[in-house]
Image (spheres, helix red, strand yellow):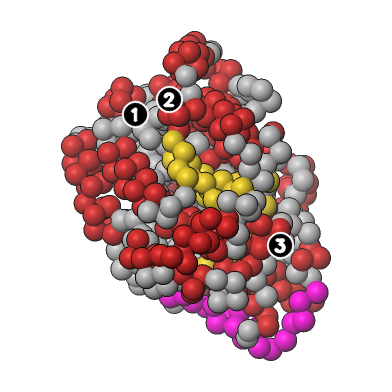
Amino acid sequence: MESSPTLWRFLSRIRLILNGQPRWKPVLDKDRTRWTTYIKKAKLGPNILIATSLGSHLAASRLESLLAVALTLRGASVSILLCDSALPACQEADVGRCPNRKHFIRYGPRRDLCIGCFSPAYKMYRSLGINVFRYSEFITADELANVHNISSTLPLEDIQNYRLDGLSIGEHALAGALRFLARGTLDNEPYAESILRQYLKAALITVYVMQHLLEKSHFEHAVFHHGIYVPQGLIREVCHHSGVRVVNWDPAYRKNCFIFGHGDNSFRTIMTEPVEKWINIQWGSGLETELMRYLKSRSYGTQDWICVHHKTSKEDLNTIAAKIGVDFSKPCIGMLTNVMWDAQIYYQNNIFKNMLEWALETIEYFAKRPELQLLVRVHPAEILGIMTSKQLFIEEIKKVFPVLPKNVFIIPPESPISTYAAMLQCNAVIIYSTTAGMELAALGIPIIVGGGTWFRNKGIGMAADSKEDYFRLLNRLPLKHRLKNDLIEQARKYTFHLFFRRTIPIKFAKESVFHSFVQTPYVINVQNISELLPGQDKGLDIICDGILYGKDFIYPAELYI
């Protein structure tokens, strides 16, 4: 039975009251005259749009309000963009928060989420004394009628590839619908078409809003979270088409850290980053010790605020073998999955249609290689992540393989078996796009990549460029050797670069004690605006310089270890 929308409206209010928007007014009141002077001076500086949009996305409003203050202190004229219940679907909505699909199709997020979204964020941003734009200011009744006409009449099969003014409207609408449903495909979902059309409507509204906003106001830079989904993916595209330089960001895995990128989702920018950005790191025992200490902690999540792990981790090999049925004395190949909806949206891949196709064809291949064992670890985030997957890997596999091949073994997502302990016993590990592949390469395990991943084209894993290439790599298994020392060092350099240099620490972001309830890992702790001035926090300086001057978002962690 589906949950009551009334309950979710109540929980939404409690969530924001308990640990909501940052309280900037008391901070600014301590030095109000000085802050007013900075606001006046900033009007002559570069215009920056912080397109938060989703006020109840506390991870966004907390950090982006911090950036608004810090950029103002550096002479930038900052404006904010917020949705004021104008969108019929957005990233804040999902089947967890809007469990009644019929209700969502009829009303969108207005009754469940909007009540606690716009007003608190608007009040918080206005307390800074900066301009706050609202979506409803930038769309007309005629345009809304056109949005309704397109979203209701466009043939279903044409939605995914639908474009308007050169913008990938349909692609972003599909990403939004997949995320809402927590699925890698829309197949066999009875409400899929209606929900997809809701996101198509929201995507079109976002485009109109952004086009009119950028016609009215000139911005040199735009900063906002994610850069994918609805509305952020459309905001990014319209900005690109209008010549506005874009910066996107996400919270990083490590506590107190964030990842920023120029022009696209921060994770995607890492995939295309040149090796010259990290290959010449002066590697030594100090950096290696710090990295290995961190990688060990990944099994337990003690240094991360974004992590998916079981409270008790089973690492005893005899226990693992007895539970799963695998024989580690015989050649064993590991296989690591992603959460299906996450893999489909974040990681671009032209080899396989999606992660499920990759998995099915890989299992079919190993069914013909009885001399090898395939040990599949299903990602624990399927059931432990903030958004529980509604399309489970094992259920999809059973549809094609009701009985698994005798040499294929699966560790289910609910199992406390340590992924690292199991994979370290393997001759090689096959991945689609999981970060764990990079970590295992740093430990000497050869990695075969079947999808898009951060370390593709970094000289670390064996990355296929076609299906034929992928299966040629599998034909080489089992490998005669693990990674050579020079490749291990290269893998460790890159892993260090990703976890310690591309993840930028901000000392004002403190881990939240209400993390699990508010789904936001941090709060902002600032006592005085002087703390945010240039030279007070290296990480914040790097972020602001990247936004203002286009500099690399790289923190020189090697200088501080």
Please determine whether, in this image, residue 261 is positioned above or below residue 284. above
Helix, strand or loop under label 1: loop
Q: From the viewer's perspective, is 8 left or right of 294?
A: left
> Viewer-proximal residue, 59 or 376?
59
Helix, strand or loop under label 2: helix
Q: Which span is picked out in magenta?
A: 280-304
Helix, strand or loop under label 3: loop
Q: Which residue occupies the extreme bottom position in the image?
A: 285
Question: Which label number is shown at residue 198?
Answer: 2
Dot 2 alpha-carbon crowd within 10 angstroms: few under 14, some 14 to 19, many 20 or more: many
Residue 246 visible: no
* Measured Cα–Cα span from mark 2 to mark 3: 37 Å
Q: Which residue is mark 1?
A: 108
Please determine whether, in this image, residue 504 is positioned above or below residue 54. below
Q: Residue at x 47, y 19 (%)?
A: 140
Q: Residue at x 71, y 74 (%)?
A: 493
* Measured Cα–Cα span from mark 1 to mark 3: 39 Å
Q: Answer yes or no: do the residues labelled 2 and 3 have beta carbons within 8 Å?
A: no
Magenta stretch: residue 524 in it?
Answer: no
> Viewer-proximal residue, 249 or 525?
525
Q: Residue at x 58, y 18 (%)?
A: 158
* Measured Cα–Cα span from mark 2 to mark 1: 8 Å
Q: From the viewer's perspective, is 512 left or right of 231?
A: left
- Amino acid, disc 2: Gln
- Amino acid, disc 1: Gly
